[in-house]
Image (cartoon, rainbow, N blue to C red):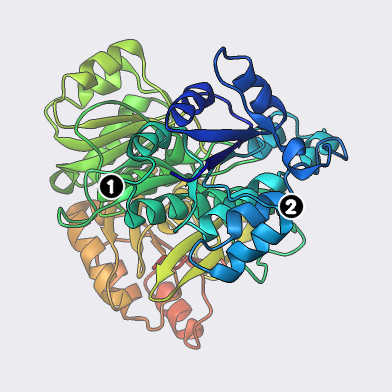
């Protein structure tokens, strides 16, 4: 058997002594650097050669240069089935290296822990480590690359000759992903804040958990969390599940929609979601009243939905929810007694997310690419709008107008909301035309539509919706305006004695 060599150079040293012992038992000669060599050599019965003995150069520039040398990378990159490569190694007196175990400086950890210490952050940009990984992964057919301590034992068990080409390719894939993630973390830290969108998109995401399935049981899915240097909460990427069945893709998607909505409001707010749209939404000074208001918005659709709270759930609220099936309950926290009540639900997933900070950008995949946009996080109030009708709103309607306008940006277009007392009374969403959405919202509200505020995410192109709203008792309409027929629409509002406000801002959500 030919002489075999393994290079071990890791920052996180857990498991490397066991790895070194196992490799030594398999007949590998060990090469190592700095702290890794010290950890291995401190164990009785094994030893590692320092890289400097191989290269003939001591570490320099405070350790910035250790492994960047032909005696290291030549031994890794040489193709074993290429006679010219082997001849070159022989001429230069370079030995082949058959296994490389590397993990990288903790750039992310240091940047988050010491954001003001730029010198330390810069020093934790690893150069030699990623280069070793890329060299070994490029030559995966001849060199084993290990970046994950979880792979140490099963790989060594198969060495030296039972590790298949597919095994090696799997390890190479993990290695390239490891380096790509590391570089994306650094790229995010150095992101040019003067530009919203750079020429290339590199975003670091770390797998949080495998999901039960995708939108349908035959689809696979997983949840990933983005790296955050601003120490703000990243929503469902940091969720804690207290009880209930495993989460599916749709559970997380709906929970995210629900949590986004309630966190747009400061007062106690409860949202009940079906298929990412709120079938119930209400704000009140008392949480249990907010829940009741949300539930009464559409009790039929609430069944099997997702319910979200923007404040810690109280025992009284948990008791009020008894008898209603929910797939997911999500909140920033739970009173102990409330959590005890919820844990008795066998099916419901009880999720806790400690805080919320909306993403600055959002991504959506398309065939062959991805769309990126800034989030719709504009804050608008009554004073920002123009009352275009002759009739002014009553003072008690202004809060409903603000509530309705904030809520409608969270509803699929074409969105129409009917609101009374800061609760959704009726909703029409996702329709191919706006008049259909108006019809659905009015039908859902029934007799409760009288004196409601109606909010539309985009302008009304015709006066037909205004007349339909008036015939059903709507008192106030809020919309962006901007149609070529705005004057006709305003005239219809005046004829129907309806208050109409123009916001000048559209809130489409596709």
Mark closer to the chain start, 2 or 1: 2
Q: Secondary structure at mark 2?
A: loop
Q: What's the residue at 39%, 43% (across, down)? A: 422
Residue 57 position within the rendered picture, expressed as x and y whole percent measured from the top left: 83, 41
Residue 426 position within the rendered picture, expressed as x and y whole percent measured from the top left: 26, 55
Q: What's the residue at 76%, 44% (across, down)? A: 55
Q: Are marks 2 and 1 in contact (CB under 8 Å)?
A: no
Q: Is residue 201 visible?
A: no
Q: Is residue 503 visible?
A: yes
In the figure, residue 110 lies in which quadrant?
A: top right
Q: Nearer the viewer, residue 203 or 242?
A: 203
Judging by the rendered image, the residue that carries numbered circle 2 is: 190
User: Residues under labels 2 and 1: Cα distance?
Assistant: 38 Å
Q: Nearer the viewer, residue 73 or 325?
A: 73
Q: What's the residue at 37%, 49% (across, down)? A: 257
Q: Nearer the viewer, residue 458 or 103?
A: 103
Q: What's the residue at 50%, 53% (across, down)? A: 177
Q: Which mark is residue 273?
A: 1
Outermost right residue:
61
In the figure, residue 469 lies in which quadrant?
A: bottom left
| Above or below 366: residue 222 | above
Q: Secondary structure at mark 1?
A: strand
Residue 474 position within the rendered picture, expressed as x and y whole percent measured from the top left: 33, 61
Residue 455 position within the rendered picture, expressed as x and y whole percent measured from the top left: 41, 61
| Above or below 410: residue 201 | below
- Quick one: quadrant of the N terminus? top left
Choose mark 2 or mark 1, whichever is in front.
2
């Amino acid at each position: 058997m030919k002489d075999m060599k393994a290079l071990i150079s890791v920052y996180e040293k857990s498991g490397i002594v066991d790895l070194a012992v196992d490799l030594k038992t398999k007949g590998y000669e060990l090469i190592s650097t700095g702290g890794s060599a010290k950890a291995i050599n401190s164990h009785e019965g094994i030893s590692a050669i320092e890289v400097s003995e191989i290269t003939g150069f001591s570490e320099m520039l405070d350790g910035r240069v250790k492994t960047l040398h032909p005696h290291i990378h030549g031994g890794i990159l040489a193709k074993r089935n290429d006679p010219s490569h082997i001849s070159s190694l022989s001429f230069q007196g370079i030995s082949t290296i058959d296994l490389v175990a590397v993990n990288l400086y903790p750039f992310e950890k240091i940047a988050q822990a010491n954001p003001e210490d730029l010198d330390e952050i810069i020093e934790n940009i690893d150069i030699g480590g990623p280069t070793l990984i890329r060299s070994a992964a490029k030559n995966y057919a001849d060199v084993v690359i290990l970046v994950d301590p979880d792979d140490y034992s099963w790989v060594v068990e198969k060495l030296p000759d039972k590790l298949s080409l597919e095994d090696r390719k799997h390890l190479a894939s993990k290695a390239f992903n490891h380096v790509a993630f590391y570089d994306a973390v650094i790229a995010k830290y150095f992101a040019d804040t003067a530009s919203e969108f750079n020429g290339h998109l590199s975003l670091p995401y770390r797998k949080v958990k495998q999901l039960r399935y995708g939108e349908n049981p035959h689809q696979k899915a997983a949840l990933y969390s983005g790296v955050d240097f601003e120490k703000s909460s990243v929503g469902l990427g940091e969720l804690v599940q207290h009880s209930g069945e495993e989460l599916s893709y749709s559970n997380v998607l709906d929970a995210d929609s629900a949590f986004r909505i309630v966190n747009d409001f400061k007062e106690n707010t409860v949202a009940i979601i079906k298929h990412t749209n709120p079938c119930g939404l209400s704000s009140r000074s008392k949480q249990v009243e907010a829940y009741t208001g949300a539930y009464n918005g559409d009790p039929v659709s609430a069944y099997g939905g997702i319910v979200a709270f923007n404040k810690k759930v109280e025992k009284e609220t948990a008791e009020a929810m008894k008898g209603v099936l929910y797939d997911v309950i999500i909140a920033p926290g739970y009173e102990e007694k409330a959590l005890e009540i919820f844990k008795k639900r066998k099916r419901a997933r009880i999720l806790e997310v400690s805080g919320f900070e909306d993403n600055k950008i959002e991504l959506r995949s398309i065939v062959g690419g991805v769309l990126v946009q800034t989030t719709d996080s504009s804050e608008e109030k009554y004073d920002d709008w123009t009352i275009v009708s002759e009739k002014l709103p009553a003072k008690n309607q202004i809060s409903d107008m603000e509530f309705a306008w904030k809520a409608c940006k969270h509803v699929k277009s074409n969105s129409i909301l009917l609101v009374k007392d800061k609760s959704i009374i009726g909703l029409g969403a996702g329709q191919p035309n706006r008049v259909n959405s108006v019809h659905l919202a009015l039908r859902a509200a029934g007799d409760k539509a009288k004196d409601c505020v109606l909010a539309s995410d985009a302008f009304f192109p015709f006066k037909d919706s205004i007349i339909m709203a008036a015939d059903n008792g709507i008192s106030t309409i809020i919309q962006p305006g901007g149609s070529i027929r705005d004057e006709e629409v305003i005239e219809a509002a005046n004829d129907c004695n309806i208050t109409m406000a123009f916001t000048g801002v559209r809130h489409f959500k596709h």
